[in-house]
Image (spheres, rainbow, N blue to C red):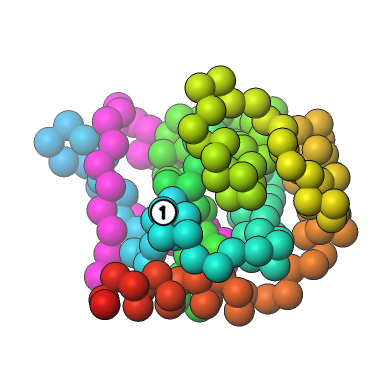
Amino acid sequence: MVFIQELHGPKETMAQLKPLEHRNIVRLYCAYWASGSIYLVSEPSVISLRQIMMFRPSWGLEETAALSRGVLDGLMFVHNSLEIAHGSLSTDNIMLTWEGGVKLANIGSSIIDGKGREHSSGDLRSLARIIQNITEPASLLDEEPRLALKHPTGTDLDDFFAQLLTVKHVSDIIEHNFVKQAQGSDGLTRCVWKWWAAMCY
C-alpha cells in the first residue's frame, strides 16, 4: 500500500526530488509526471496529529516531549541534509505510526517549494503553535491567537516553548531539558491504539 499525492508545478521541478528515508520523515519512494501534474508516491501513515487531537486521548507532558523530540529530529534532517525549511508544519502533516513513531509528511512539496533553511526558524515557531494548541486547546478558538501560554505549566515545557519563539536553528534547542524528558514512544503508542479502539467501537 502506498500514498499518492498530486502536486501542481512545472515538470522541471521533478529533478529536485529523490527518494527520502529517515525515521522521522514519511518515506518518499518516487515521483512521476502525468497529465500536467506531479505525483509523489510515499509510504502510508496511520494517523495525523490533528486526528489524534480531535479524539483528545489522555495526553500529558510525556507525550508532548516525545512528539517534540520526533519533530525536531525530523526538522534537523530537513534543514541540514536537504537544506530547506518544511514551510508548512502543522498537525495535518505530523503523522504517527502504530509504534508511536513521529514522521513529518509533505517533504516532497517542501522540496518543490524550495524555501531555504534560512526560514528554519519559522518551522520552530510552527512547532510552538502546535504545542500551544495541544497544551491549551481553547487557543484554537482565539480570534487573534497569540503565541503565548496563558496558563504556564510550571515545568521545563514553559522555557522550551519560549525558546522555540526565539532560536534560529534546531541545534540550538534539541538538547533542551524538556526534550530530554522524552521516554521513548510508549505514550504515543497508547494514544494511537486508543484512537483506533474508539474508531472501531
Would residue 117 appear left or right of 86 to someone viewing this image? Answer: right
State whether residue 151 is above or below residue 153: above
Residue at the spot 81% in from the left edge and 31% down from the top edge: 166
Residue reaching furthest left?
A: 35
Q: Can residue 175 be seen in this view?
A: no
Would residue 173 appear left or right of 99 to someone viewing this image? Answer: right
Residue at the spot 69% in from the left edge and 46% down from the top edge: 80
- Amino acid of disc 1: Met
Indicate yes or no whether the magenta region holds residue 192: no
Camera-side residue: 50 or 174? 50
Residue 10 at x, y percent in the picture: 30, 27
Indicate yes or no whether the magenta region holds residue 5: yes
State whether residue 62 is above or below residue 174: below
Find the magenta span and give its range.
1-30
State whether residue 3 is above or below residue 75: below
Q: Quadrant of the C terminus?
A: bottom left
Residue reaching furthest top?
A: 144
Residue at the spot 52% in from the left edge and 76% down from the top edge: 189
Q: Considering the numbered disc 1 on the image, is that residue within a helix, a strand or a loop?
A: helix
Would residue 37 appear left or right of 137 to someone viewing this image? Answer: left
Residue at the spot 43% in from the left edge and 77% down from the top edge: 193
Residue 199 at x, y percent in the picture: 29, 70
Residue 94 at x, y percent in the picture: 49, 53
Q: Can residue 114 be seen in this view?
A: yes
In the rendered image, which residue does mark 1 sit on? 54
Circle 1 crowding by C-alpha within 10 Å: few under 14, some 14–19, many from 20: few
State whether residue 159 is above or below residue 49: above
Total marks shown come to 1
